[in-house]
Image: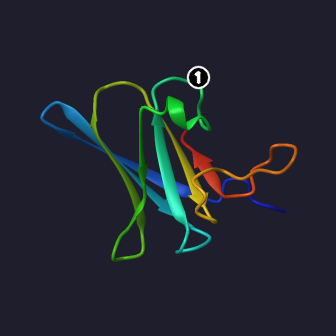
Amino acid sequence: MKQIFPFFFFVLVTANLGALDLEVQIENRQSKQSTIHCGIFVQADGFPTENKKQYQNTKGNMEADGRTICRFSGLNGNTYAVSVLEDLNANGKMDSTLVGYPKEPWGVSN
């Protein structure tokens, strides 16, 4: 059976002079050569797939210890949702089947 949510990620929020920083740690990547795209949303409209409606986006950085981290900075006290995509073929988007099921690993916050 194919696993729909192959990622586990942890969220760490730190305060910095009134602004908040958010760190998302991604584990269980399928490939170390893939690109990890992370987006943060402040509204449900467009979440999780519409990149143009993201409040911020970033690419994950591979740390020396093998972890992948996405970092967001300058956030305020809003409620946010995070989406993560492992772009296996580096085309900058989520590939899907003809009926719309994702072909690449992805995950969202709850």
Tell me: 57 left or right of 99. left
Element on which disc 1 rests: loop
* Figure label count: 1
45 to 39, vertically: above or below: above
Quarter of the figure that contains the C terminus: top right
71 to 6, vertically: above or below: above
Nearer-the-camera pick, 11 or 87: 87
Nearer-the-camera pick, 66 or 104: 104
Where is residue 70 drawn, in percent x and y?
A: 40, 54
Task: Give the residue furthest to the left.
Answer: 17
Where is residue 81 drawn, in percent x and y?
A: 49, 34
Where is residue 66 drawn, in percent x and y?
A: 42, 75
Name which quarter of the figure residue 48 lies in: top right
Name which quarter of the figure residue 25 lies in: bottom left
Name which quarter of the figure residue 64 lies in: bottom left
Type of amino acid under label 1: Asp
Residue in the picture at 75% in, 57% down = 103
Quarter of the figure that contains the N terminus: bottom right
Q: Which residue is mark 1?
A: 45
107 to 81, vertically: above or below: below
Where is residue 79 drawn, in percent x and y?
A: 42, 26
Nearer-the-camera pick, 62 or 7: 62
Tell me: 79 left or right of 91. left
Task: Give the residue furthest to the right.
Answer: 99
Tell me: 65 left or right of 105. left
